[in-house]
């Protein structure tokens, strides 16, 4: 059975999802007029309850469900993955000023020249992992190596669907940010590593799945060597013309086979740590 982080069914603690108090368009209810500020008596009531107004509710579970519905309509097939993405609060992993965009299908800056990937890209790449030979029918990916932790969002999603996740980040401030984001979920099945992702993490190899959030001219041999027989790797790679495409690599007893997928655009793959 997949181990779920947090302390409630669905994976994360109570208190993160604040639903909108105003009616949404199309539900048949009268809408409260928009106001530039909350009325004084309403603000006093909120203060007395120690409640933070939730604005338009764009950080709510209902908005995440709409995101998941779009992903399902776009062809994402793994129900375990869709459940994970409905549980992980993406707005928790982006700057407060960007939280209103957290469930749009867009990448967002997380500092240091890096971005959090679009939900559709995260879903597509993990869904491809689920099609690998080592993916289990109970919705688990086994042991996963993630290259490029970033802010930790994809790591949290992987933690919901994998037995164990090793995630490597080369940029120390991002590593620290991800560690802070993930700490409160008590993810005992996640190991964060500040290191050179191009080298993988040989001490925990082999991996049933490898996923990378940066693309280079080729796939590092270390990733291929650390992939288990029956395992699958999904990563962006530079292809003809200088653009990037997702590359799927399956390892068999006879070697590795590659299959090019759709075009993508990721940050360049770099070596070393900073």
Image: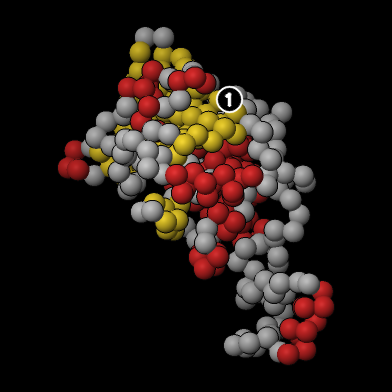
Crowding at dot 1, Cα within 10 Å, few <14 / some 14-19 / many 20+, comes out as: some
Q: Quadrant of residue 218?
A: top left
Which quarter of the figure has residue 57?
Answer: bottom right
Who is closer to the viewer here, 30 or 147?
A: 147
Q: How is the image coloured?
A: secondary structure
**Residue 189, above or below 61:** above
Residue under the image location 45 percent in, 56 percent down: 110
Locate residue 250 relative to residue 73 in the image: left or right: left
The residue at the point 47 percent across, 36 percent down is: 194
Residue 28 lies, with reference to residue 215, above or below; the image says: below
Residue under pointer 1: 142
Which residue reaches farthest top? Answer: 253
Residue at the spot 67% in from the left edge and 71% down from the top edge: 54
Nearest the camera: 247 or 43? 43
| The quarter of the displayed image where residue 77 is located | top right
Q: Is 232 in front, or is 168?
A: 168
Residue 223 is left or right of residue 186, and the answer is left
Which quadrant holds the N terminus? top right
Residue 132 position within the rendered picture, expressed as x and y whole percent measured from the top left = 48, 25
The answer to whether residue 246 of the structure is visible from this angle is no
- Residue 198: percent from the left, percent from the top? 36, 31
- The percent position of residue 133, horizontal first and vertical second, equals 50, 21
Q: Position of residue 201 (x, y in %)?
A: 45, 25
Looking at the picture, tell me which residue is in the foreground, 237 or 80: 237
**Placement of 19 over or under 40, stated as above or below:** above
Q: Secondary structure at mark 1?
A: loop
Taking the image as shown, residue 99 lies to the left or right of residue 222, namely right
């Amino acid at each position: 059975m997949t181990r779920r982080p947090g302390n409630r069914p669905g994976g994360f603690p109570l208190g993160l999802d604040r639903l909108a108090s105003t009616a949404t368009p199309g539900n048949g209810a009268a809408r409260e007029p928009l106001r530039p500020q909350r009325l004084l008596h309403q603000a006093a009531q909120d203060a007395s309850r120690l409640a933070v107004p939730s604005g338009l509710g764009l950080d709510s579970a209902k908005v995440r469900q709409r995101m998941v519905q779009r992903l399902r309509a776009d062809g994402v097939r793994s129900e375990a993955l869709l459940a994970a993405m409905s549980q992980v609060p993406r707005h928790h992993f982006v700057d407060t000023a960007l939280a209103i965009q957290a469930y749009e299908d867009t990448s967002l800056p997380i500092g240091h020249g890096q971005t959090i990937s679009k939900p559709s890209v995260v879903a597509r790449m993990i869904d491809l992992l689920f099609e690998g030979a080592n993916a289990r029918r109970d919705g688990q990916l086994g042991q996963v190596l993630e290259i490029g932790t970033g802010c930790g969002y994809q790591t949290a999603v992987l933690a919901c669907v994998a037995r164990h996740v090793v995630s490597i980040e080369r940029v120390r401030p991002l590593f620290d940010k991800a560690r802070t984001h993930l700490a409160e979920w008590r993810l005992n099945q996640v190991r964060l590593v500040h290191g050179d992702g191009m080298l993988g993490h040989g001490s925990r190899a082999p991996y049933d799945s490898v996923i990378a959030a940066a693309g280079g001219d080729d796939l590092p041999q270390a990733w291929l060597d650390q992939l288990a027989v029956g395992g699958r790797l999904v990563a962006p790679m530079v292809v003809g013309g200088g653009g990037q495409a997702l590359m799927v690599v399956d390892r068999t007893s006879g070697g590795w086979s590659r299959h090019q997928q759709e075009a993508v655009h990721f940050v360049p793959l770099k070596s070393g740590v900073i």
